[in-house]
Image (spheres, rainbow, N blue to C red):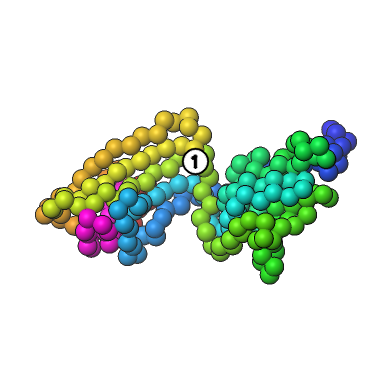
Amino acid sequence: MKKVLFLVCVLSLLTGCSSAPKIKYVDVSVPELNTSSTAYLGETLLMQARGYYTDVVELGNITGSYVAINAGKYCRLPGSDEYFSFDSRSIRFINFLGGSRGYTSRLTYEEDSNKICIDDMWSGCFDSSYGTIEFKKNTLCSDPNSFQQIIEYNGKAGNILNFTYREFSGDRVKAPYTTNFTMDTSEGDTLRYKGAQLKVDKATNQQIVYRVLRNFNKAE
């Protein structure tokens, strides 16, 4: 078995060898509890999913002679200089005839030079002249296959605030669910829905200022 695994990884020089990262995900709430936040019409007030905070490189599409890198978010692996995409085929290795010779989802990033590099003898490194490369520190990386819940703001009519609740799973095993609901500000300034609790400090038809007191499954 060890000989087989060794042979597979040696052949990765031609085809790419990338194992799925092992990461400990936790329930992540955005924004933080008891912090004043502002959302505008159609924006998310509250989101909860599984993920972790780490450094992130956001890329546009980048193509070299022997590799094609899909646009998207690449998250730093904990305790590593490697970054990965949740799409296991986000980086395609190109052979001499222009066809595919394998895939990976990992790359490295050089902050000083703002370059990304692919660990492959032919692929090499790329700077922003090849496409957009944006580095962000301490950014949320949420597992797209996790169950997610969000509340969006849909404006105000008189004393009535309008909201949309959505829940979905990235793997689509659970069908997306959406429903609209309202809050009457003449009856108080606290919104409660699906276990979540928000205090509304100010609202117009275009924006809302609020604080999250409790998320969908997190106590204050």
Tell me where the magenta segment starts and ends, as one range. 195-211
Q: Is residue 185 visible?
A: yes
Task: Characterize the magenta stretch by its predominant secondary structure.
Answer: strand
Q: Residue at x 43, y 43 (%)?
A: 148
Circle 1: is it few (<14), some (14-19), or many (20+) Cα within 10 Å? Answer: some
Give the image location of residue 4, x and y in percent: 85, 34
Residue lying furthest left: 186
Apparent side of residue 204 relative to residue 50 in the rendered image (left or right): left
Between 57 and 80, the one lying in front of the other is: 57
Residue lying furthest bottom: 112
Residue tagged by mark 1? 146
Between 145 and 87, the one lying in front of the other is: 87
Height in image: 172 above or below 108? above
Q: Residue at x 62, y 49 (%)?
A: 61
Q: Is residue 23 visible?
A: no
Q: Residue at x 46, y 52 (%)?
A: 28
Q: Residue at x 40, y 34 (%)?
A: 176
Height in image: 73 above or below 113? above
Three-letter amino acid code at disc 1?
Ser
Give the image location of residue 109, x and y in percent: 68, 60
